[in-house]
Image (spheres, rainbow, N blue to C red):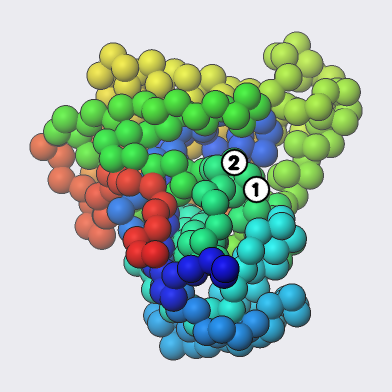
Amino acid sequence: MTAAFPSHTAAFAPGRVNLIGEHTDYNDGLALPFAIDEGVHVSATATGEVTIHARALDLDESDSYALGGEAPSPGGWRDFVRGVTAELAAAGLPVRGAALEIHGTIPRGAGLSSSAALEVSLALALLALADADVVPPWPLARICSRVENDWVGAQTGLLDQLASLCGREHTAMRIDFRSGVIEPVPLQLGEWRLVTLDSGVGHSHAQSGYNGRRRECAQACEQLGISSLRELEPAMLERLPPPLDARARHVFEENARVDAAVDALARGDLAELGRLLERSHASLRDLYEVSVPEVNATVARALDAGAAGARMMGGGFGGQVLALMPPGTPAPAGALEVRPGAGARVLER
Ligand code: GLA
């Protein structure tokens, strides 16, 4: 008897906001993201062929290729689709020929993880179409992140994919990238609001200084003889030459800020959360050096408008700024309010 495969599936995966804990994920550190309502929708219809026909509805572009014959494209969204089918198969998961339709509501390259949302949504729709067993968040995040690493050329960590997969309404998540533990952290903002502001500078992790920062962290570990910067002790910093000492110090202090933010949220001390956002930004700007003048100007604009704290968000070198607005303080023009939404899900199978 042959299995009764679905003929059509659909999935949705959200983008994410990272409250605090930046450039810590690939250092076995801590982060505090949440999934947002905006994301990427993928529908998959079985074709009975061994090919993928994909359409990016927002761009009015398409791509067709044979499963098993994936090759990198000249760049853009096609690499994500080709990478997802190739990496699912490489992980021993079933992939069926399909016509895919992709539609997104997150601005691309804005630092809200449109790429992770695309990978996760594609993976969920394709796995549902093959009637595959549910793949747990960590292994699925790793498969999706291999698409970024090996198909797109960005040596990113697992923050974005995990946030997209594990999102919950009204809840941020404290992710410990060393132990693998993901703890829900209620995000009760009352009359306070979190908003994102576009710096106007797009970014691409494959082309920015992101991979260079990751290399510097690996060099720092090598020089100290530790396996990750999570093992760093402050006394070790003086054994590192610049700029490795500054990079390592950022990671060490940013991990501590994640736990300070979790404590501040538990106490309902949102003014303290704002101060932590500011310190995180100063560290990303001065120690990790991943901010750019336009992003710093956007942070200043948010603070001038009365934000209790604001910082660059994501990999850096452009993208969005996150700002915390106190009760009764209007957000600056063009700001988008963000709140924690549900994680990635199969919508039809
Ligand atoms: C990007 C990457 C993540 C993470 C952040 C920085 O969003 O995709 O893995 O490294 O930058 O915190």
Tell me if residue 118 comes above or below residue 216 in the rendering.
below
User: Callout 1: 10 Å neighbours few (<14), some, many (20+)?
Assistant: some
Residue at 77% x, 33% y is 244
Check disc 2 and report its element: helix, strand or loop: helix
* Quarter location, residue 310: top left
Q: Is residue 118 visible?
A: no
**Is residue 336 placed above or below 237 in the rendered structure?**
below
Q: Residue 155, position in %: x, y?
A: 70, 52
Q: Marks 1 and 2: CB-CB under 8 Å?
A: yes
The residue that appears at 41% across and 74% down in the rendered structure is 8
Question: Between marks 1 and 2, how big is the CA–CA gap?
Answer: 6 Å
Pointer 2 residue: 138
Quarter that holds the N terminus: bottom right
Furthest-front residue in this view: 1
Q: Quadrant of the C terminus?
A: bottom left
Q: Is residue 158 above or below residue 82?
A: above
Rendered location of residue 119, percent (x, y) = 54, 61
Across the whole image, how many numbered discs are drawn on residues? 2
- Residue 107 placement, left or right of 176: left
Residue where numbered disc 1 is placed: 142
Crowd rating for badge 2 (residues with CA inside 10 Å; few <14, some 14–19, many 20+): some
Residue 225 seen anywhere in this rendered image of the structure: yes
Residue 269, image x and y in percent?
A: 27, 18
Residue 70, percent across and down?
Answer: 72, 77
- Between 158 and 50, the one lying in front of the other is 50
Under 8 Å from ligand 1: the CB of mark 1?
no
Q: What numbered label is drawn on residue 152?
A: none
- Name the residue type under label 2: Trp
Mark 1 secondary-structure assignment: helix
Amino acid type assigned to the residue bearing label 1 in the image: Arg
**Depth order, front residue of 66/164:** 66
